[in-house]
Every structure is written in structure tokens, then in C-alpha cells.
Image (cartoon, rainbow, N blue to C red):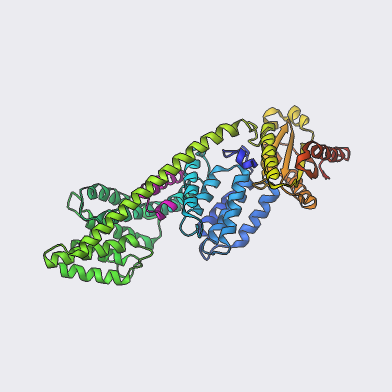
Amino acid sequence: MSSGAATRTQRGSRAHTVEHHGAFELARSQIRISQTPDYDPGVITDLQARAMDHGWVDVLLVTDYVRLLASENDPDEAPARHAALLERARASGDIVFEALALGQGATAVMWGDRARLDVDRDLARATVLLRDAPQGHKMLGSAHVECATAYLDRDMWDLALEHTSEAAAQWETDEHDLERMGTLLYNRAEIHLRRLCVLRQSGPAAELVEFGDRARFAAQHVPIEQIPESWRIDVHIFENLVDAIAPPETGLSREMADGEGTDFATYVALARSFVEPDAGEARRFLAEALDAWDRVRYPELYLLALTRDAELESVQLGFETAGLRVARELALRRHEARVAGVEAMASLIREEQMLSEHARLRVEAELDALTGVANRRGLAGHVDALTDRVRGLGRDPEMALVLVDVDHFKGVNDTFGHDVGDEVLVRVANALRTVVRETDLVVRWGGDEFILLLDTDDLPAATRRCRSLARGIRGDHWDDLAPGLSVTVSIGLAVGKISALDDLRDAADRALYRVKAAGRDGVAT
């Protein structure tokens, strides 16, 4: 159990500094440009260095995400970036970022050679995590978008739209996300259109009216002023195709766009094939579209164009052709496969929901209520699990145990009050999270004393991590919490066998005593 596994909510300091907030928003602004020529990796490198120095876990997570997005199409780099984001999210206990990483890893561009069931299970877990996510989290909208993209890659329209709506609900209240909101609603309109095109492959049906109205509504409610000018003609074309496939009950369709030279010129040709009364002329429009279409990028539209061509051929010949019967049968088989896929995903989601509930009940008993890190019971459970694992492997590896004491903490409570003292403990716990990995553990041992259990036997490396931790806590902006407040920590660490945990803790305690005897605010081994 990592500190992240123990913490299933987004916890953090209640008093972010101006510098911290500015760094977070700068990191978040890089998401939008991460896949454009405007992206500067140096900005992210600088932000990560500052975040490490100050213990800003949220900034580190955003920068990890930006780096992942920037490398998304690089098969050599992207998996490592994804693993780094997921590991930090779990180690810090941030369920929104964990869901974001799982959802992003389940998209078609990322899942690579992994077994489909494993990837689907990750997506189901992401969905369950987001149901319990804190609503004020600044990255909640992005997490829903990643899940929506993954569901869209599976042609699971309803689930994709569910996450899209959740993202919209998050972004509509944040002025920093207005531009992304426009993009989101543009994508929502395209999802509705793609679903409508799939339904139409089976031929005219009563349900097309309902789904046509939904698609039309989505296209008409894209905030034109919030999307790039070049996209505005696209929305017009989306609405033209919706009107052609499922004409509005008013009979008043929007005038046909001039799509020549646009990315969606083929959509216009497909729309014309539905409204052109002459079957031969309509097939000419389709021939142009089929020659130009990217079958991989737009399979729903390409298959609909083929189906429509078979329909028009039947009109010309005066009877239903074998080609049209095959098209209808294949459309039915694809629909049945999609229904089965959605049912399988629903089963995975239910399974993950039960597992999550059981884990939540177990973990709550192992958490410190104030800081969200593990308590003594959590440490005992972690050690038991480690002991069982190493016993099964037939070896007894060494680990580093770190004791962290907040210096003069009683004086903080006496001078500034217990509310400030509690906030100091929360901030220190967050700082500890910045130096742990998924296989490590952060524990509040009692009062102002913490334990780090690090999955390493490299004492010099563990010492460097502890010195960085002490430096970051010392340099934090404690004045923002209470004027005149300063906080330092004393750290003692030792490396030894996990089977001799008491001896290991005694060794770390002796090192901690030496730091205190030397005046505190230091690290000793």
C-alpha cells in the first residue's frame, strides 16, 4: 500500500501561496499548447524544479500530464511518461489524476500492445474513481475528457457523452477553461453526429428523429465565439448533415454550406446525396466523397456513404440489391457487437465499483483523518503485505526507514493556535508525498512525527531525497499561513531488513536524536 493507495481523496493545503497558484495556472496553461509549435519544454522543466523545491504535488502532476500530452504520438517516450504520471498520482493519493492517467492510457493512441480487457478494466476504474471525485478539483474536467475520448474510441456513444457533459459542467464555471469549453462542445456535436451516422447505416428508422434532434441541438449550441474561426464552417456542415439524415420536423433545414477546401468537404457531399432527388446525381456526389475519404479516421461516415450508395443503386435498379442487403446485415452485426461491448463495459464498471467500495472501507480505517496519509494501522498492514511478498520470493530485502519530526511544534501551537498547527501538519504531509513513489509509504506516527518507508536500500540516494525534503519545507512560504511563522524538520534515517522493523526504527531514531542534539533542522543517518 502506497501513501496514494491509502488516500482516496484529493487532499492539500488550504492556503496556497500566490506563487504556488501562479505556478499551477502556468502549468495548466501548457495543456492547451502541449501539441502545438508554441510548446516550450523548458517552461515545464523550470516548473518541475520549482515544484520539487516547494513540495507542490499538484504542479508536479500537471507538468507530468503536459509532458505526456507532448509525447503522446511518440511510441518510445509516451509509455514512460504515462507510467510516471500514474505512479505520482497514486503515490500522492490524487484520484482525479489517477483517473485522468487511466483514461488517457485507455485511448486508442496509447493502449498499444496491451490486452484489450486490461485496458478496458483501467477505463472502468477511471469511471468509478471520477464518480467519487472532489468537485472542486481543477483537473476534473480534463479527466472526464480523457475518459470520453477512450469511450469514443470504442464507439460507446452514451458513455462518451456522459463524460463530456461532466467536463462541461466543470469548465463552465472556470474562466480559464472557456476556450477549452468551446472545443469540448464542438467535440460533443461531432460525437452526436457520428452516432447518428451509425444509426442511419441500418436504414431509415423512427429513432432517427430523436437522435437527429439531439445532434442538431448539440451543433446549434456550440459557442461559436469560443472556437477557432476555421472550425465555424465545420459546425455549419455538421448541422447540414444532421438535417439531411434526419430532417427537422419544421421542414426548415439550414442552407447548405460551401465546404469546398475544408476538412469536412466530404460531409457536404454525403449530405447532398440525401437531399438530391436524382439518384444518379446523388451517387456522383458520393463517388467524390468516397475517393477522398479517410476510412481509418472517419469509419462511421465512410460506411454510411457506402450504404447510401447501395441504397441509391437500388433506387436506380428498382429493387433491393444484394449489396444493400449485405450493407444492412453488416450494420446490424456491428450494432450487436457495440451493444455487447457496452454490456461488457457496464459489467466491468459494476465490478470496479464493488472493489472500490470494499477498498474504501478498508482504507478509511488505515488513514490519518487530518493529513490523509497512513496511520499506524496502515503501516502495519503495509509491512504485513511486504513481509508476505518477500517470504514468497524467498528473500529479505533492505528498505530505508525515515523519521521526520516537526521542530518546535508545541511552540507553533502555543503561538499561532491549533488550527495553524493542523495546517502545518497537512503541508508537511504533502511535502512528504513529493519524495515517495508508488511502492513507498507515508505514515503519521503520532503528533508531529512522521515515518517514510522507502522501497530502496540505497542510503546515499535516500539521504539526498531527505535533504531535498528538508530544504523544501524550510523554504516554503509559511508567512502566508501565519505572519512570522517558520517551519523546519529534523530527519533521521536508516537502511535495514524489513523483517527487523523495530531495529530499523531504533536506528533511525538514534539518527534523529543526533540531529536534534546538533540544533535540529537537518538530516542524519
The residue located at (65%, 37%) in the rendering is: 373
Q: 214 above or below 136?
A: below
Q: 123 above or below 241?
A: above
Is residue 154 found inside the magenta-colored segment of the image? Answer: yes
What quarter of the picture does the N terminus occupy? Answer: top right
- The magenta-colored residue range is 150-173
Judge left or right: residue 204 versus residue 72: left
Tell me, yes or no, if residue 63 can be seen here: no
Judge left or right: residue 5 versus residue 154: right
- Residue sitting nearer the eye, 339 or 523: 339
Judge left or right: residue 163 versus residue 456: left
The residue located at (30%, 52%) in the rendering is: 335
Q: How many marks?
A: 0
Image quarter for residue 496?
top right
Tell me, yes or no, if residue 204 can be seen here: yes
Q: Position of residue 122 (x, y in %)?
A: 50, 48
Q: Position of residue 491 (x, y in %)?
A: 79, 41
Q: Position of residue 429 (x, y in %)?
A: 68, 39
Is residue 77 found inside the magenta-colored segment of the image? Answer: no
What quarter of the picture does the C terminus occupy? Answer: top right
- Residue sitting nearer the eye, 446 or 173: 446
Judge left or right: residue 332 versus residue 483: left
Image quarter for residue 346?
top left
The residue located at (31%, 61%) in the rendering is: 301
Q: Position of residue 402 (x, y in %)?
A: 77, 42
